[in-house]
Amino acid sequence: MIDEPRRQRALDELDVVDTPTDERVDRITRLAQELFRVPMVSVTLLDHDRQWRKSEIGLGGREAPRAGSFCDATARLGATNVVPDAAADPAWADSPWVQGDPHLRFYAGHPLEAPGGEHVGTLCILDTEPRELDERQVALLQELAGWVQLELARSRELDGALLVQRALAPQRLPEAPGYELAGASAAAGAISGDFWDIVAHEDDLRVTVADVMGKGTGPAIIAASVRASLRTAPHRDLASSVAEVDRLLEESLSEANVFVTAFHSSLRLETGELEFVDAGHSLAFALRADGSWERLRSTGLPLGMGLGEDRRSASVALEPGDALLCCSDGLLDILDAERPFEHVSRTLAEHGPQGAVEEAVRLARERRAPDDVTVVVVRRSA
Amino acid sequence: MNIAVTTASGIATIAPEGRLTAVAAPQLRQAVQQSIDAGTARIVVDMAGTEFVDSSGLGALIGALKAARLAGGDLRIAAVPEAVRTVLRLTNLDRVLRAHDSAATAFDGD
């Protein structure tokens, strides 16, 4: 017999019900649909009296009643459950799932286990036509279910890291009269090695974008520590703050072959004077009100190289109507390859800083950008 | 990845073939360290047979450069693919990792 309270507890501990869709799980349902050539696939979790689908294709909804469902039967069975033709099966012929919408005829499901072995849900494939599964296909379904199980268990750990990163992103942008500020980041994988920051210090704004080379949890943690260091002691001049990060990375990462490119700047709100230190980032631009642009270059090496780099700042003036754009190299992958800056200027003119940043994130997701995309825009009002 | 090492007139030439990524990066570091330990700290990384370098590969080159300089030598790169030159230029790393046309001439004039 199923120990229902224990089963529900195990599901609750996975902390997956009512979370957004997850590309890592969606990938498996897509693969299952492709491999079995079925119209419907679901990763179903049995939550109290309902079925909740972490991922689904063709079912048209994420929730359904649990009582009398195929997936509930599979979880009770605790083994692969194949119903080749439900209409011809006395146990299922009268089921509302068969008699009514979606008029199921074929069902095959395999239980998903929580780390403690409790059957918390199923991976199932469904069809409106009767079908058979051969031995090899049953093994394949079991294999895919094992993979879903792994992703569900792993998402807890990753989501924890994601939470850390979100907590570190600016929750709320500072007030900057006469300026419009916007920034956003879209991670290529689950976690980004990019970060951006805008903080106020007296009459200045500190604007930072950095990119830790590499992807995943390691770079994200390094990004967090770089941000923390740059935020510390804001009265220091820019070059000293950057030099301190250089030292920090060199001490802790000298063997790791990791490096960080960064643009760290201070904007004097009253005059529009922007002082900056560029550490091998080279992706900051002054977009002029007349549509022209210039790259804010310097010759600084990336951070953490350990080559005794002397950090120096340079400066540029933002006139009314001008904007500072700073991004990570991922943005270049998704822009119009021929005329990237026209693309940016046009988007900025049409949608303003916030709209332009949202557009960049939308493009990154739509085009499945291969690298993390981060973009920050600060525009001085005309 | 296959890494060939030849030593002649006090210069070690290290030629990584194929993709210089996270998988191959430790091998490159090891080959450089072995040359340094054997007394040759003047090193040329010949990239004529290197198809692709990612950020880990770049990190390994920088790590190797540091190790060579620490041992009183230097590390130069030769026959660098255009895509790698672009990354070096953008990150200003071309200041410290100068690209030479060929391995044979990388230490000329020293």
Image: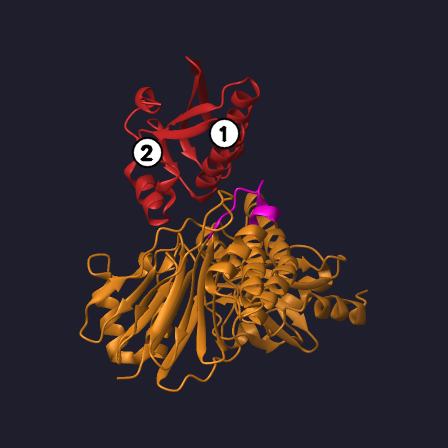
Colour for chain B in the figure: red
The residue carrying pointer 2 sits among few (fewer than 14), some (14 to 19) or many (20 or more) residues within 10 Å by Cα, namely: many
Q: Quadrant of residue A116?
A: bottom right
Residue B78 coordinates in the image, percent (x, y):
33, 28
Residue A227 coordinates in the image, percent (x, y):
54, 63
Colour for chain A in the figure: orange
Disc on the earlier residue, 2 or 1? 1
Label 1: state its secondary structure. helix
Q: Quadrant of residue A151?
A: bottom right
Q: Nearer the viewer, residue A134 or A269?
A: A269
Q: Quadrant of the C terminus of chain A?
A: bottom left
Say whether residue A79 is visible: yes
Circle 1 sits on which residue?
A: B68
Residue B7 coordinates in the image, percent (x, y):
44, 15
Residue A223 coordinates in the image, percent (x, y):
54, 59
Circle 2 sits on which residue?
A: B99
The residue carrying pointer 1 sits among few (fewer than 14), some (14 to 19) or many (20 or more) residues within 10 Å by Cα, namely: many
Asked if residue A84 is positioned above or below residue A135 in the image, the reply reads: below
Q: Nearer the viewer, residue A56 or A82?
A: A56
